[in-house]
């Protein structure tokens, strides 16, 4: 079937079977491999993407469910010239990255949180990324990076 | 401006950018034209004889291109180190649920799975050995190979430590304590599952991208199993999505299977695992039973330790003989004793199989000994932290192995600092008072550790680096050691940059590739910083000498007169010349701008009767954990963790803190939630819905500090870090729970029932989920 949606700020139409997951659509039909599979049962968040501004696990979403909606993956987060955005920059700055496998999902979880809560507490940040498993970092520097970005963005919005 | 110094200063991880952008390509992200997908048929029985294996029906399935069995490998693909007991595909028998029997390559993952289902495989069940305590009974089912040394076939090895005569000391001990502790298996739970991609080369060889820890080991196994000359086998290290010891064995099998299928079909072949397949087929941290006896004087001076450990290696040896050895060396803890007697015995069973995992034996024994130390302190009536301070190893002491500690022994400082950071003394006192009146019980516990740096007596210990100035004056550095997330590429870059006096950004460090890097042994045992870091330093120093000659020539001075200002060189005329100009001058002089460096660890000596110098130096550390236990539900909340570790020198601070936070979090998981049960050989948790690793909500903000007690042979004085940060977390947590509830939990994990009732409520499981897991679609 033809699936029509906005992917990373551009409109796309793709012919794909109706019974595949959004994760398969992204990785195997669109070649966007930044979104990872860690469990395929909705437990790890490695496959997290933003659908209409909300975080969803693409392994639990059927591809046709994105029809007419707005999808952002890790490939759509960086600046137009390809440089990392401020949150990605802070992930680097605060040492939030180790093996990197959970990181695309973590960045999207951070963005989704900051969209609805520009001033989160550390506990709210922990809650927001609690559906994203990371086996390497112990989460602390990921929380640092999201917290710093929230502060920078708020300061920026004020000035 | 002074000379550039990057070591110990804020720095950025060299591979962070591609990872935050999502452009880093892990094995599962590769897409090649004509690439086939591979899948293995895996045993549904924990122990069986293969009566009939007919793969021809698979070849009639649409899309299937090739099928292989053990017959497609030299010597049936027998491999393993230090014991050769496993096959690239099962030969005659299967010994655990999930063992690979045949492998299929097909156009799509679905066709590969259909092909696997079409294979006719008749298995005759054999008696199952599920209880390690029965493994050495005369009539136990035989799992291991027939022993040529007259040992029980299920006996793998025994590792002793002998110091003094415990029998003579026991009667003189005013206080003694005997306890039994157990730890279950632990799953590594790397977020990226296993994977390998093999590409046949025009000259008849194969290039393999394998998500593994040691590309040179992979190459060695491929050469042996495929019967190819080593020049035709290339092993390339892609980014690895976590390993923690868990990608140093099974992945070599996947690698050999994809390589054989690639050679057979002439097409690229990739195999990646679904999570369920990964959980069922992959090896775990071993389970261990520990019997500990301690003796002390009434004033709290430790005198003797007897430690008998039984290690469940499961169906294969993998690295358990080494795990058992490391466990034996650390079993008595970082204390002084008059006499010590340790025996760690490893046995075969049909419980999956066990191999390397972060901490490698020390994690297991530390859980036992550090609880026993607490229980003994309690019995004597001493504060457990002060008890440790009284007995812990100090500079100049002799270890229970007979090794004199001559430098870099920072345990006393770790203990006192962690005591102060955590506000130990006040909390210890106040919590005891508080707990008598509240259903929420507070507790604070401590654990200390020592951890031998690098391989020790496990084997030859050396690493190599190459370094080269490119045409654009950037620098390429290689190491034969793998960065699977720990940050070692950044560590090597910073060390080389300081040696050359250049900015780290000038250096590109490649991932290991057997065609460009030099064999540096395995990436295990937290050996990267010391052994690999020294190799990078030696290589950079060799290159720096060449560049210094060019600078002296250009500036018309002696080598000793050269001074650095930033990257620039300055001579007696005080006119700086840029690094680029010096390098151009070197080229005009005809000098070759590349170098190699090899570093071999200081010699060690271990006598197999149980004494000697097991490691050239040790890491020391102490952690304090604070908990709040709800006696209504049994739920343990981790309120705080404080950790102080003597690492010699911190090279890459951000990376060091990250290792500590991550290791401690894995330790909390081990203590409280992570549970691997084998029910008659069937794994009971096959994905993250049942195997609970800590989330961001389960862990508090962790406070970490480092003691930098210079180790003279380390690069900039550095020792190691990655494994030891995990080791004391679980016992510190259990000691905190004991402080809170007044009772020790001696079996992991300390789940709700064990905390509340003192015993486990788990019921017998079934094999269904485990069997189904082997057929999960990709
Ligand atoms: S892969 Fe989707 S949640 Fe794990
Ligand atoms: S960085 Fe490895 S899983 Fe998060």
Image: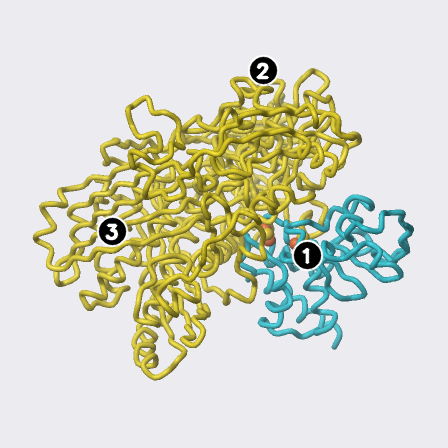
Chain colours: A cyan, B yellow
- Kind of element beneath mark 2: loop
Among the 4 quarters of the image, the one containing residue B163: top left
Which residue: 69% across, 41% down? B28
- Relative to B294, is B437 on the left or the right? right
Q: Do tags 3 and 2 sit on the same chain?
A: yes
Q: Position of residue B456 (x, y in %)?
A: 35, 36
Which residue: 37% across, 49% down? B364
Q: Residues within 10 Å of mark 2 (few under 14, many from 20)?
A: few
Q: Position of residue B140 (x, y in %)?
A: 34, 36
Q: Is mark 1 within 8 Å of ligand 1?
A: yes
Q: Camera-side residue: B41 or B330? A: B41
Q: Which residue is mark 1?
A: A105
Chain letter behind tag 1: A
Q: Residues within 10 Å of mark 3 (few under 14, many from 20)?
A: many
Among the 4 quarters of the image, the one containing residue B83: top left
Q: Is residue B547 visible?
A: no
Which residue: 19% across, 57% down? B177
Q: Which residue is mark 2?
A: B229
In the rendered structure, find residue B292 and report the number of the disc placed on it. 3
């Amino acid at each position: 079937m033809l699936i029509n949606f906005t992917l990373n700020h551009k409109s796309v139409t793709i012919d794909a079977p109706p019974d595949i997951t959004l994760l398969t659509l992204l990785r195997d039909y669109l070649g966007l491999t930044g979104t990872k599979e860690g469990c395929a049962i909705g437990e790890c968040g490695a496959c997290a993407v933003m659908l209409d501004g909300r975080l969803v696990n693409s392994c639990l979403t059927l591809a046709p469910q994105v029809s007419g909606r707005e999808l952002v993956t890790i490939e759509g987060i960086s600046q137009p010239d390809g440089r990392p955005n401020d949150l990605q920059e802070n992930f680097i700055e605060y040492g939030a990255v180790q093996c990197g496998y959970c990181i695309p999902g973590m960045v999207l979880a951070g963005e989704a949180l900051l969209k609805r809560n520009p001033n989160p507490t550390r506990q709210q940040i922990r809650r927001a990324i609690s559906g994203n498993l990371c086996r390497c970092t112990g989460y602390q520097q990921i929380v640092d990076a999201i917290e710093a970005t929230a502060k920078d963005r708020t300061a920026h919005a004020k000035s | 401006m002074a000379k550039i110094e990057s070591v110990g200063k804020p720095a950025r991880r060299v591979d962070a950018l591609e990872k935050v952008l999502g452009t880093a390509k892990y094995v599962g992200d590769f897409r090649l034209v004509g690439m086939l997908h591979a899948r293995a048929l895996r045993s549904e029985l924990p122990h069986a004889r293969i009566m009939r294996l007919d793969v021809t029906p698979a070849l009639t399935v649409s899309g299937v291109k090739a099928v292989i069995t053990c017959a497609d490998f030299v010597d049936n693909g027998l491999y393993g180190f230090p014991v050769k007991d496993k096959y690239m595909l099962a030969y005659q028998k299967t010994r655990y649920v999930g063992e690979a029997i045949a492998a299929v390559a097909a156009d799509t993952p679905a066709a590969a799975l259909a092909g696997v289902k079409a294979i006719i495989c008749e298995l005759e069940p054999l008696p199952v050995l599920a209880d390690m305590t029965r493994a050495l009974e005369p009539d136990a089912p035989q799992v291991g190979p027939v022993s040529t040394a007259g040992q029980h076939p299920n006996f793998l090895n025994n590792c002793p430590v002998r110091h003094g005569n415990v029998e003579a000391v026991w009667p003189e001990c005013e206080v003694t304590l005997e306890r039994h502790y157990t730890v279950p298996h632990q799953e590594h739970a790397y977020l990226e599952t296993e994977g390998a991609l093999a590409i046949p080369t025009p000259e008849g060889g194969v290039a393999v991208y394998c998500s593994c820890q040691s590309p040179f080991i992979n190459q060695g196994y491929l050469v042996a199993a495929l019967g190819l000359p080593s020049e035709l086998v290339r092993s390339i290290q892609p980014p690895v999505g976590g390993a923690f010891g868990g990608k140093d064995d099974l992945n070599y099998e996947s690698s050999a299977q994809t390589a054989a299928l690639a050679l057979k079909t002439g097409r690229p072949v990739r195999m990646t695992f679904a999570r369920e397949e990964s959980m069922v087929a992959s090896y775990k941290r071993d389970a261990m039973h520990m019997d500990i006896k301690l003796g002390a004087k009434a004033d709290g001076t430790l005198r003797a330790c007897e430690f008998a450990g039984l290690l469940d290696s499961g169906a294969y040896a993998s690295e358990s003989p080494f795990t058992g050895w490391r466990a034996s060396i650390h079993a008595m803890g970082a204390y002084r004793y008059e006499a010590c007697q340790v025996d760690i015995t490893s046995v075969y069973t049909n419980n999956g199989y066990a191999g390397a995992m972060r901490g490698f034996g020390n994690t297991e024994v530390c859980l036992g000994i550090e609880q026993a130390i607490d229980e003994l302190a309690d019995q004597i009536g001493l504060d457990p932290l002060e008890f440790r301070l009284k007995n812990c190893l100090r500079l100049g002491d002799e270890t229970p192995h007979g090794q004199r500690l001559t430098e870099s022994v920072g345990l006393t400082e770790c203990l006192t600092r962690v005591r102060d950071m955590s506000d130990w003394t006040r909390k210890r006192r106040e919590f005891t008072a508080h707990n008598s009146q509240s259903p929420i019980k507070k507790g604070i516990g401590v654990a200390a550790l020592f951890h031998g740096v690098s391989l020790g007596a496990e084997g030859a210990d050396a690493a190599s680096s190459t370094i080269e100035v490119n045409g654009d004056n950037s620098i390429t550095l290689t190491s034969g050691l793998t960065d699977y997330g720990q940050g070692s590429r950044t560590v090597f870059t910073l060390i080389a940059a300081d040696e050359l006096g250049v900015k780290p950004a000038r250096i590109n460090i490649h991932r290991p590739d057997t065609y460009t890097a030099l064999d540096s042994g395995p990436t295990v045992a937290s050996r990267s910083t010391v052994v690999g870091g020294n190799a990078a330093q030696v290589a950079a120093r060799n290159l720096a000498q060449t560049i210094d000659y060019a600078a002296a020539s250009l500036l018309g001075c002696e080598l000793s007169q050269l001074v650095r200002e930033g990257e620039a060189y300055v001579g007696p005329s005080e006119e700086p010349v840029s690094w680029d100009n010096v390098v151009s001058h070197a080229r005009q002089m005809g000098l070759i701008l590349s170098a190699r460096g090899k570093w071999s660890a200081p010699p060690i000596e271990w006598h197999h009767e149980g004494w000697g110098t097991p490691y050239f130096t040790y890491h020391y550390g102490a952690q304090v954990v604070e908990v709040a236990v709800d006696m209504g539900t049994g739920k343990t909340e981790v309120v705080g963790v404080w950790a102080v570790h003597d690492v010699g020198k911190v090279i890459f601070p951000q990376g060091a803190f990250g290792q500590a936070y991550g290791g401690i979090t894995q330790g909390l998981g081990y203590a409280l939630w992570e549970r691997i049960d084998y029910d008659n050989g069937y794994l009971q948790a096959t994905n993250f819905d049942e195997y609970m690793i800590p989330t961001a909500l389960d862990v508090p903000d962790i406070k970490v500090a480092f003691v930098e007690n210079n180790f003279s042979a380390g690069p900039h004085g550095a020792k190691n870090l990655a494994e030891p940060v995990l080791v004391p977390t679980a016992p510190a947590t259990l000691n905190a729970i004991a402080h809170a509830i007044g009772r020790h939990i001696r079996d992991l994990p300390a789940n709700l029932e064990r905390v509340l009732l003192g015993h486990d409520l788990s019921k017998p499981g079934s094999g269904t989920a485990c069997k189904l897991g082997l057929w999960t679609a990709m």
